[in-house]
Image: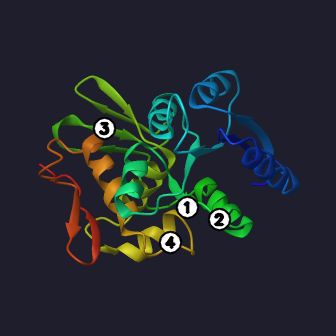
Amino acid sequence: MSAASILIVDDDAQIRRVMRTTLISRGYEVGDARSGEEALEKMRAQRYDLVLLDINMPGMGGLEACRALRRGSDAAIIMLTVRNAEADKVEALDAGADDYVTKPFGTPELLARIRAALRRLPSLADAPQRLTLDKGIEVDFQTRRVSRSGREARLTPKEHDLLRYLVSRPNETISHRELLQAIWGADYGDELEYLRVFINQLRKKIEPDPSNPRHILTEPWVGYRFSPPQQD
């Protein structure tokens, strides 16, 4: 994990310098960019495992940059912002971020969030490699691709892990806390907005009618359940 490469994107030179020094001292490979536009250029030139992306920047803002990065990259993305309202968190997650950190933050919190974003679910013996859903929608867990009506969509790493965890236990209600801790780590459990956003994103990609889901079902106040397609 410590060999991961991280791109810091912030228009504040002092913040970039402090984070760069901190992360290099922990063994990470680190690059930095002063704007969303520069971040996109650097991501095209080099592969990074994770992006620390400030939400408030001149020119291309953090949300716009996040959406652009997500269209062409599977890198984990952590948004950095001074705003802490739930609506702001949801907006960042909707843009494609994996996590959200509020400034000012301490080094231990930042490092924990990085570890959580880079965390990948271990292999699940009961999870299939491919999944065929209603209306011929197909999920390939090895390539993280969803095929529907001749078009392909890509699952982000966290979407992939969340769907695979649900699919590995069909027809079983899994609690919010268990899902959060399985996908993001033991320090999580109360961030219900994360699940709401990621479940909505998954439904848009795998459900024939996302507003009337057949496969990823909500169990009110408890959690979520995967309902396999009906066998003929």
Question: Comparing marks 4 and 2, which lies closer to the viewer?
Answer: 2
Q: Are marks 1 and 2 in contact (CB under 8 Å)?
A: yes
Q: Confirm whether residue 172 shows in the render.
A: no
Q: Amino acid at mark 1?
A: Thr
Q: In the image, residue 128 lies at what x, y percent?
A: 41, 51
Residue at numbered disc 3 = 138
In the image, what residue occupies the spot 52% across and 45% down?
55
Q: Which residue is labeled 4 in the image?
A: 181
Q: Does 128 sit left or right of 78 as displayed? A: left
For the residues marked 4 and 2, what is the alpha-carbon distance in whole angstroms? Answer: 21 Å
Q: CA distance from mark 1 to mark 2?
A: 6 Å
**How dense is the environment of label 2, judged by Cα within 10 Å: few (below 14), some, or many (20 and up)?**
few
The answer to whether residue 77 is left or right of residue 108 is left
Q: Pointer 1: residues within 10 angstroms few (<14), some, or many (20+)?
A: some
Residue 204 position, x and y percent, is 26, 43
As helix, strand or loop, the secondary structure at mark 4 comes to helix
Q: Describe the element under mark 1 as helix, strand or loop.
A: strand
> Nearer the observer, disc 3 or disc 1?
1
3 or 1: tag closer to the N-terminus: 1
Residue 1: image quadrant is bottom right
Which tag, 2 or 3, sits closer to the chain's start? 2
Mark 2, residue position: 105
